[in-house]
Image: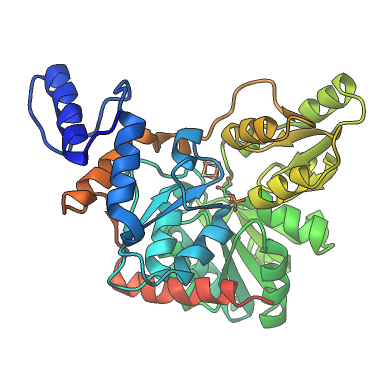
């Protein structure tokens, strides 16, 4: 069926009108709309090179199908930084990724997050006032000048700005080792936030530090739940944050899959717990996980510990290999999953109609300092 955008918009309006009893131009289309894919194609074509659609690897297939670039958070940040021509960057991922894209793009480019409720539970575990309180303790102990903050991409713009202001850098799961090595050329201690697991796995399994070199800062306890001496002695101060999706994988999962599938290789994301990562065969970012499976010989067997949309797509795209999910229970990232085709169609059609919705715009002051920390990451050797 060959339909114009106007026809399709009208169809969508009718659907909603009957469902809600109102006529409401440009509202969220119903997921049941049989013309949704066609509407997405028409709106995408109408936007042309004015829009770039970025899709994180954890997005649903229906969204990935429309992404111009798919990638891990590092690749998508680079893509945003390198594109100075698209008027709209439609970011199919979560809030902190869209914030980073806004910081790295020109002031006349607009970053759109199709569903504003697509946040990240890990990023929400570090509030800037809590981080400032922790830093005040390090200042009181005379440690701040020799402590370098390294902030995982999965954090708010305000935390990235704190990092930029205090001589630190952002990192992602694909360059945490390089960022931490760089930090130790700049100071004697690393304050790693908000993912304790990525921080610990990098410090111990990549840099060769001891578990005892790391302490955990609990933002809900006075002095982070630590004595002054523990803070003074630590090489790495880990923020007490974690990913609720990756935190679920266990050593039992690994033992179970190894017993069930002889010869299987366990490949996990570094947001998994230390015990899981140290028992796995291979560890890396989402982009690394995909490349590793794609480049493995036919007949290889992989049990993957990361988000389920990615693992299901890997299994579909590599039918000559056995690709299974490490855990037996379903484990989508519920916030990544909030971006669905209705939301993508909604923001695209609204842009076609000349209205910008769901724009992510970081406060100028925060953006300035966060950009310093992001650019330090992009410049890492
Ligand atoms: P990547 O940096 O591997 O894309 O991971 C981002 C993320 O949110 C993992 O949970
Ligand atoms: Fe955040 Fe975890 Fe979802 Fe990644 S998988 S976006 S860290 S909640």
The front one of 157 and 133 is 157
Residue 102 horizontal side relative to residue 11, left or right: right
Q: Quadrant of the C terminus?
A: bottom right
Residue 40 horizontal side relative to residue 283, left or right: left
Q: Quadrant of the N terminus?
A: top left
Residue appearing at x 32%, y 30% in the figure: 36
Q: Is residue 117 above or below residue 36?
A: below
Q: Is residue 165 above or below residue 76?
A: below
The front one of 66 and 162 is 66
Residue appearing at x 39%, y 68% in the figure: 103
Residue 10 horizontal side relative to residue 172, left or right: left
Residue 316 coordinates in the image, percent (x, y): 66, 30
Can the viewer see residue 181 in this picture? Answer: yes
Q: How is the image coloured?
A: rainbow
Residue appearing at x 64%, y 48% in the figure: 286
The front one of 63 and 164 is 63
Number of marks present in the image shown: 0
Residue 358 coordinates in the image, percent (x, y): 26, 49
Residue 161 horizontal side relative to residue 245, left or right: left
Looking at the rendering, which quadrant does residue 376 occupy? bottom right
Q: Residue furthest left?
A: 22
Looking at the rendering, which quadrant does residue 170 occupy? bottom right
Can the viewer see residue 220 in this picture? Answer: no
Q: Is residue 260 above or below residue 207?
A: above
Q: Is residue 147 above or below residue 309?
A: below
Q: Residue furthest right?
A: 263
Residue appearing at x 86%, y 19% in the figure: 260
């Amino acid at each position: 069926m060959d339909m114009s955008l106007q026809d399709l918009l009208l169809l969508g309006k009718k659907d909603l009108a009957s469902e809600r009893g109102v006529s409401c131009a440009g509202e969220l289309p119903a997921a049941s709309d049989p013309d949704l894919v066609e509407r997405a194609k028409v709106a995408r074509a109408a936007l042309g090179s004015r829009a770039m659609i970025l899709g994180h690897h954890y997005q649903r297939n229906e969204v990935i199908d429309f992404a111009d670039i798919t990638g891990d958070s590092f690749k998508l940040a680079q893509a945003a930084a390198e594109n100075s021509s698209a008027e709209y960057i439609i970011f199919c991922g979560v809030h902190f990724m869209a914030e980073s894209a806004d910081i790295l793009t020109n002031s006349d480019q607009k970053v759109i997050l199709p569903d504003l409720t697509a946040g990240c539970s890990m990023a929400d575990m570090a509030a800037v006032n809590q981080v400032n309180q922790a830093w005040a303790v390090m200042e009181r102990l005379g440690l701040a000048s020799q402590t370098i903050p390294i902030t995982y991409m999965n954090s708010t713009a305000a935390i990235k700005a704190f990092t930029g202001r205090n001589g630190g850098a952002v990192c992602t799961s694909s360059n945490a080792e390089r960022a931490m090595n760089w930090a130790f050329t700049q100071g004697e201690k690393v304050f790693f936030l908000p993912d304790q697991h990525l921080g610990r796995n990098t410090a111990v399994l990549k840099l060769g530090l001891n578990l005892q070199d790391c302490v955990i800062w609990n933002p809900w306890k006075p002095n982070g739940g630590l004595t002054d001496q523990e803070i003074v002695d630590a090489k790495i101060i880990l923020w007490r944050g974690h990913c609720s999706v990756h935190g679920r994988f266990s050593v039992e999962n690994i033992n179970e899959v190894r017993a069930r599938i002889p010869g299987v290789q366990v490949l996990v994301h570094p947001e998994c717990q230390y015990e899981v990562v140290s028992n796995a065969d291979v560890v890396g970012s989402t982009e690394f996980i995909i490349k590793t499976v794609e480049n493995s010989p036919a007949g290889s067997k992989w049990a993957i510990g990361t988000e389920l949309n990615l693992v299901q797509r890997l299994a579909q795209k590599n039918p000559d290999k056995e690709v299974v999910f490490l855990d037996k229970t379903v484990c989508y990232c519920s916030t990544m999953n909030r971006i669905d085709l209705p939301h993508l169609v909604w923001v695209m059609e609204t842009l076609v109609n000349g209205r910008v919705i769901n724009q992510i715009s970081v406060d100028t002051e925060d953006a300035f300092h966060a950009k310093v920390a992001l650019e330090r990451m992009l410049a890492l050797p």
